[in-house]
Image (cartoon, rainbow, N blue to C red):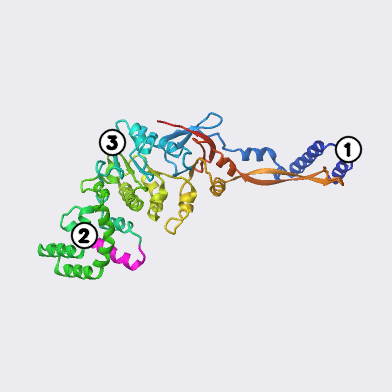
């Protein structure tokens, strides 16, 4: 083999670069074959195959699926409805709402119950409200709309629940400066819920705010003791709790009273629907928040919805229905640790979460926390529309991943006159490149996206369907 290489070197000046390259490849192939094919460092056929594997060649899905759009080679692109959660990301005007509308359509066609939360608050043409109304056909739809709290359907998140969950709902509606205050308020609210249950008083925002003040709390405890529904010892402990924690809890209850006494208080009613009940009816329940008009209330109510949807998950464990869609748009408005927990646990209840926001930056710093990594980690499927920011485009390129490729380098030499001529020497080595370059992500047209599924081991560009 050494003599063969020397002979090539001796004739190199007389041969064009292309011939030299071809002879080098022949030598590498002979080396590979001499080792029984085990050395595939320069197996170009394999490298080309791996670099294009599963691109635009989606396998046929026999399961229930959502038609997402059409690939550049005119193939229909589908997302399995049992996907391990889906993250949709696209800047304003890129077509994010249209992408979400395909899941709304699929949910209605398959007759799934659905929870939809619109954190943007738009109710005009082509909004989620408009799309759901147009596509719903005969399906029952509940709409809780912060834009129209006096005329929309009513909501009671405290139905079908326990004192522990009610306590979590109310506690998560407030930011706490110290754990001491949070702990005392938790104890107080939990005890109050137990008293309301003993008194056969329906738990609602009205009843909670009415009996939260220590004076009303103690009167209720006294009444129950007089009716022998409480022992004297239990009543005494309630008096002590009211003395120690009542003032702290009353301060926190001002937040709940503010909601009840505002115009938005009209959406809450004892006879209102909760998410679990709506899903049991096989209905669609749509919440329309309005962070522009209610910048403080919308996140609070959004967090309440998330905890109510977690309650529905826990109840659905024992009563699993068919596939359920949770479509959560503009999650940056109401995201919390409770939402991450919801996404983690919902798959066991046959729920597919479709989370959406405009950019990764939206999840980077919310009340001192970053949710970016946890959202990306909890979703196996990504629908990426245009990103305008260099930072976001580069981050997405990294998330979507790289592929193996072969890189060739050639040596040149400079002449005395400043010219450069090839030396006919070079090297080949294995390298990695982005599957989708940041510039490709920034240049996506409106209504065009990149779909990557780790469930299916598939990726493709896609022109998004507009189903309405």
Q: Residues within 10 Å of mark 1 (few under 14, many from 20)?
A: few
Q: Is residue 181 magenta?
A: yes
Q: Earlier in the sequence, mark 3 or mark 2?
A: 3
Task: Give the x, y percent position of residue 322.
Answer: 34, 39
Vertical arrangement, residue 38 with respect to residue 170, above or below:
above
Q: Residues within 10 Å of mark 3 (few under 14, many from 20)?
A: few
Q: CA distance from mark 2 to mark 1?
A: 95 Å
Marks 2,1: beta carbons within 8 A: no
Q: CA distance from mark 3 to mark 2?
A: 34 Å
Q: Is residue 352 left or right of residue 5?
A: left
Secondary element at image label 3: loop
Q: Earlier in the sequence, mark 2 or mark 1?
A: 1
Residue that carries the numbered disc 1 in the rendered image: 14
Q: Nearer the viewer, residue 2 or 393?
A: 393
Q: Residue at x 22, y 61 (%)?
A: 212
Task: Give the x, y percent position of residue 239.
Answer: 19, 69
Residue that carries the numbered disc 2 in the rendered image: 194
Residue that carries the numbered disc 3 in the rendered image: 140
Q: Earlier in the sequence, mark 1 or mark 3?
A: 1
Q: CA distance from mark 1 to mark 3?
A: 81 Å
Marks 1,3: beta carbons within 8 A: no
Which is in the foreground here, disc 3 or disc 2? 3
Q: Quadrant of the C terminus?
A: top left
Region rendered in magenta:
176-193
């Amino acid at each position: 083999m050494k003599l063969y290489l020397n002979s090539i070197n001796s004739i190199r000046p007389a041969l064009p670069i292309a011939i030299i390259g071809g002879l080098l490849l022949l030598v590498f192939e002979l080396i590979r074959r001499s080792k029984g094919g085990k050395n595939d460092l320069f197996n170009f056929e394999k490298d080309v195959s791996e670099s294009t594997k599963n691109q635009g060649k989606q396998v046929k899905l026999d399961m229930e699926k959502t038609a997402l759009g059409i690939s550049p080679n005119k193939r229909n692109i589908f997302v399995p409805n049992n996907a391990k959660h889906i993250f949709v990301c696209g800047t304003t005007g890129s077509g994010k709402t249209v992408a979400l509308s395909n899941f709304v359509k699929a949910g209605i066609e398959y007759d799934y119950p659905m929870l939809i939360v619109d954190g943007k608050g738009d109710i005009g043409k082509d909004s989620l409200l408009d799309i759901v109304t147009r596509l719903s056909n005969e399906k029952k739809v509940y709409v809780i709309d912060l834009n129209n709290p006096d005329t929309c359907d009513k909501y009671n998140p405290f139905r079908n629940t326990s004192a522990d969950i009610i306590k979590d709902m109310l506690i998560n509606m407030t930011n706490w400066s110290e754990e001491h205050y949070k702990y005392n308020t938790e104890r107080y609210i939990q005890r109050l819920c137990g008293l309301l249950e003993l008194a056969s008083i329906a738990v609602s925002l009205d009843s909670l705010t009415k009996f939260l003040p220590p004076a009303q709390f103690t009167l209720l405890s006294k009444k129950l003791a007089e009716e022998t529904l409480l022992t004297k010892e239990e009543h005494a402990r309630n008096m002590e709790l009211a003395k120690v924690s009542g003032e702290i809890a009353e301060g926190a209850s001002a937040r709940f009273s503010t909601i009840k006494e505002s115009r938005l208080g009209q959406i809450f009613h004892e006879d209102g629907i909760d998410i679990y009940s709506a899903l049991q009816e096989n209905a669609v329940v749509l919440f329309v928040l309005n962070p522009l008009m209610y910048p403080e209330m919308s996140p609070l109510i959004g967090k309440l919805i998330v905890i109510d949807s977690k309650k529905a998950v826990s109840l659905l464990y024992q009563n699993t229905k068919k596939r359920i869609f949770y479509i959560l748009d503009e999650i940056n408005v109401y995201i919390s640790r409770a939402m991450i927990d919801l996404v983690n646990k919902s798959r066991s209840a046959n729920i597919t979460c479709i989370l959406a926001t405009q950019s990764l930056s939206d999840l980077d710093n919310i009340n001192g926390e970053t949710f970016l990594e946890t959202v990306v980690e909890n979703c196996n499927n990504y629908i990426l529309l245009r990103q305008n920011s260099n930072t976001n485009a580069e981050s997405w390129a990294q998330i979507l991943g790289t592929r193996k490729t072969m890189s060739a380098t050639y040596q040149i030499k400079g002449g005395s006159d400043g010219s450069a001529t090839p030396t006919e020497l070079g090297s080949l080595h294995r390298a990695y490149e982005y599957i989708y370059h940041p510039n490709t992500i920034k240049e996506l047209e409106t209504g065009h996206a990149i779909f990557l599924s780790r469930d299916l081991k598939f990726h493709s560009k896609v022109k998004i369907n507009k189903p309405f």
